Amino acid sequence: MNLDNQTASILDNAVQFFKSEAGFHRLLNAFIKRYQSLGRIGGSVRLANPSYQEKEAISRLLRKDLSSNKSITVKLSNFEQELENTKFAGILLKDLLDGYAGYEIFTKTEMQKRYEEEKNNFLQHLAGICSQSYCRQWLEHIQTKGAGTRGIHQAYDDDPQILEDRLKNVLKALSCLPSPGTEKDPSQFQRLPVFANGVTGDPHGLDLDTAQGRFFIAALQFIRSQQNDSYLVGSSPAAEEINELLGYFGIIRDDLLNFVTCAGILAFDASGALQKMWNNAWQSGAVMNVPLRELVKSNNFIPGISCTAPEKQKVIFVVENSGVFSEVADCFTDSLLPPLVCTHGQAKLATLLLLDRLAANGTTIFYSGDFDPEGLQMAQRMARRYGENLKLWRYDAGDYEDSMSEVVLSPERLKKLNGINLPGIIKVKDRINSTHRAGYQEYLVPKLVEDIRKHM
């Protein structure tokens, strides 16, 4: 505000007066809130249960006896008019409220506009120091409040400076990804603590239980969605989904506990040489739990039967449950084990990487799982990941009838079926919605074994 010296002096005196008079404090604070919400000097405010000081001060200014009032209602325009009858004549109520507050008061609309401008400038500043296109696109995604960015906006409200430091680390991490969604050389994989230490100077700098780690995952989800239209950004990805996401970018969270259970598979190194461990396991009929640490040492995988019967179709049989895996394997004690993989429910990164390599060399994946909401969700994810390379195995309505148990599915679990839209299992979904019963693989073991023998 630009005031002449005389008016500025009057305003200073008015501010000092009203600050010193406790009877006006609640009224002026109410005026400020009213101005912010209304956007102009207007309307009125009501003081409930006014104190003696408030009644006396306001009565004196308004020249009314309010001593017996149980509440006092004051129009802002009337208050401004009455100021003209005091020694503070010539000042505006808005200027008085600014001086009383100690800063220029803005309306809520103005404050929101300033807030958005400051936040946009904040993000533009970060974009200005980024050279990587995905970094800038992610910042634009944040600016438009895209999926997975709510936590970032909340962090800005808490402390912009702390957020800036964290986002700089995340942006640096995005610029240093060892394998940004391309075909991976096993030697390119990095362990998350090592990667985090190189980027942030702290091995725990990208831990997933920290805000910085969560921002990193949100950024990776966004980049993945830009590279693959079918990838869905989830607000709370499961642990294995996070592991798979990190693996997609060449980062390993845990390479020992992350393993794949398999049998009947052969592996080859970068030179094309057959890996002894895998060959010995196949020849001896052994089942292996292969940790990610060992899995990434091999560049190519094939079903073992492709060596003994190269004319046969390359296939791998994937089951969801470990008990079913063992039951099936027990049926082949008189011969070499068929190519088998067990996902133990939600497939681990190690399992997905093995299946990725098998699919890449033309192997057809036969996938069998349970007939419950979670089982159908996993089947749908696998089908979407491998497309034409995957065949749903024993997953039609008739198989469901044969595997139906006495387990009644709760309404909460049945709601998960709403997201099932894969054509191959729609009929099964509808039947489960009708019966409310779960079906389990264990009932289908004889048929699974029969199917496998046809490919041996």
Image (cartoon, helix red, strand yellow):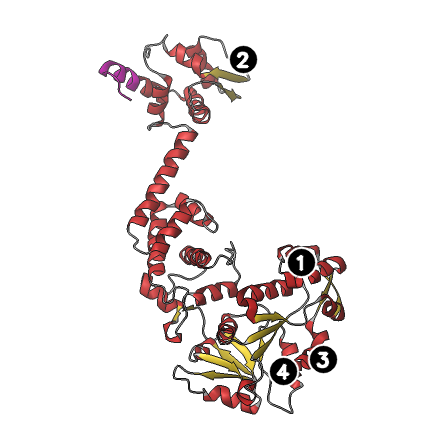
Q: Amino acid at mark 4?
A: His
Tell me the quarter of the image containing the C terminus.
bottom right
> Which of the labelled discs sits on residue 455, or is there none?
4
Is 105 or 418 nearer to us in this picture? 418
Tell me the quarter of the image containing the N terminus.
top left
Tag 1: Cα neighbours inside 10 Å, few (<14), some, or many (≥20)?
few
Label whose residue precedes the other's in the sequence (2 or 1) = 2
Q: Report which residue position mark 1 lands on.
A: 413
Q: Report which residue position mark 3 lands on.
A: 446
Give the Cα distance between marks 4 and 2.
97 Å
Residue at left 24%, top 14%? 6
Q: Left or right: 156 with respect to 389?
A: left
Element type at mark 1: helix
Q: Are marks 3 and 2 in contact (CB under 8 Å)?
A: no
Q: Are marks 1 and 4 in contact (CB under 8 Å)?
A: no
The span picked out in magenta is 1-13
Q: Report which residue position mark 2 lands on.
A: 68
Q: Amino acid at mark 2?
A: Ser
Element type at mark 4: loop
Label whose residue precedes the other's in the sequence (4 or 3) = 3
Give the Cα distance between marks 1 and 3.
28 Å
Residue at left 45%, top 71%? 254
Element type at mark 2: loop
Q: Left or right: 443 with respect to 9?
A: right
Q: Measured along the vertical axis of the image, is residue 446 above or below residue 376?
A: below
Is 47 or 67 nearer to us in this picture? 47
Q: Amino acid at mark 1?
A: Arg
Q: Amino acid at mark 3?
A: Pro
Q: Left or right: 346 with respect to 184?
A: right
